[in-house]
């Protein structure tokens, strides 16, 4: 099992002046998704990246996982197929194969695919430790964002890339065997392009 990866963020309810004072002592890169939520998703993603990167070479440190500790969860009227890590850009056509796309759209790119038994293991656990300490993830990896996410920027310099972690299966109530989502977690990454560089924002 990988070494637990822990990042912290202060609660949003702290006074702004106190938050700004502490932020002056933080690292100069970007951390998103490590904030504790009172009602957590059972699947979660967290990411970290440099604030400025060259266009087409955007690397992030990505952590993701689940809260289940007792094997693959069971859902009524649901036959599990796989757990997928997807990228999405609104309005951008991506190359996700239709039979592996639970969103019935061509705007989702399947980046990685796991069997339920592989994913729902201790290697991909995360824990909401406390309001102050945030989340601890068992898994971390470096990801080079796919080039498809940066096609056709046009004149508008802003783009939001959404990351989805989804437990995909077949809806047994549907006679055509339509794919459905039993659980999902997500995180957004906002990008701004200027002079061949891309800045990342929370």
Image: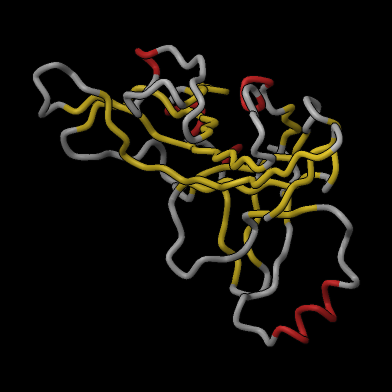
Spot occupied by residue 40 in the image (x, y as percentages of width and height): 46, 60
Q: Can you say which quadrant of the picture contains the N terminus?
A: top right
Residues 50 and 4: in front is 50
Spot occupied by residue 43 in the image (x, y as percentages of width and height): 47, 46
Spot occupied by residue 111 in the image (x, y as percentages of width and height): 57, 23
User: Which residue in the rendered view is the most extreme toward the front?
Assistant: 155
Q: Quadrant of residue 57?
A: top right
Apparent side of residue 190 relative to residue 186 in the rendered image (left or right): right
Residues 63 and 198: in front is 198
Spot occupied by residue 172 in the image (x, y as percentages of width and height): 15, 26
Q: Quadrant of residue 167?
A: top left
Picture layout, residue 97 above or below residue 198: above
> What residue is shown at x 68% (from left), y 20% (from top)?
147
**Number of on-image labels:** 0
> What residue is shown at x 52% (from left), y 48% (from top)?
44
> What residue is shown at x 66% (from left), y 84% (from top)?
14
Q: Can you say which quadrant of the picture contains the C terminus?
A: bottom right
> What residue is shown at x 65% (from left), y 43% (from top)?
158
Colour convention of the picture: secondary structure
Apparent side of residue 18 relative to residue 126 in the rendered image (left or right): right
Apparent side of residue 20 relative to residue 27 in the rendered image (left or right): left
């Amino acid at each position: 099992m990988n070494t637990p990866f822990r990042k912290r963020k202060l609660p949003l309810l702290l006074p702004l002046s106190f938050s700004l004072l502490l932020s002056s002592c933080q690292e100069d890169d970007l951390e998103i998704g490590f904030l504790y939520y009172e009602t957590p998703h059972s699947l979660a993603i967290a990411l970290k990246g440099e604030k400025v990167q060259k266009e087409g070479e955007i690397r992030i440190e990505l952590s993701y996982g689940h809260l289940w500790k007792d094997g693959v969860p069971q859902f009524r009227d649901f036959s599990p197929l796989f757990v997928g890590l997807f990228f999405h850009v609104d309005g951008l056509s991506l190359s996700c194969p239709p039979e592996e796309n639970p969103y019935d759209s061509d705007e989702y790119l399947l980046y990685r695919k796991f069997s339920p038994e592989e994913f729902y293991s201790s290697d991909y656990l995360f824990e909401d430790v406390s309001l102050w300490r945030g989340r601890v993830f068992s898994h971390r990896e470096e990801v080079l964002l796919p080039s498809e996410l940066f096609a056709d920027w046009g004149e508008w310099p802003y783009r939001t890339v959404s990351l989805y972690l989804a437990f995909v299966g077949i809806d047994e109530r549907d006679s055509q065997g339509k794919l459905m989502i039993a659980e999902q977690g997500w995180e957004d990454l906002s990008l701004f392009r200027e002079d061949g560089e891309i800045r990342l924002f929370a």
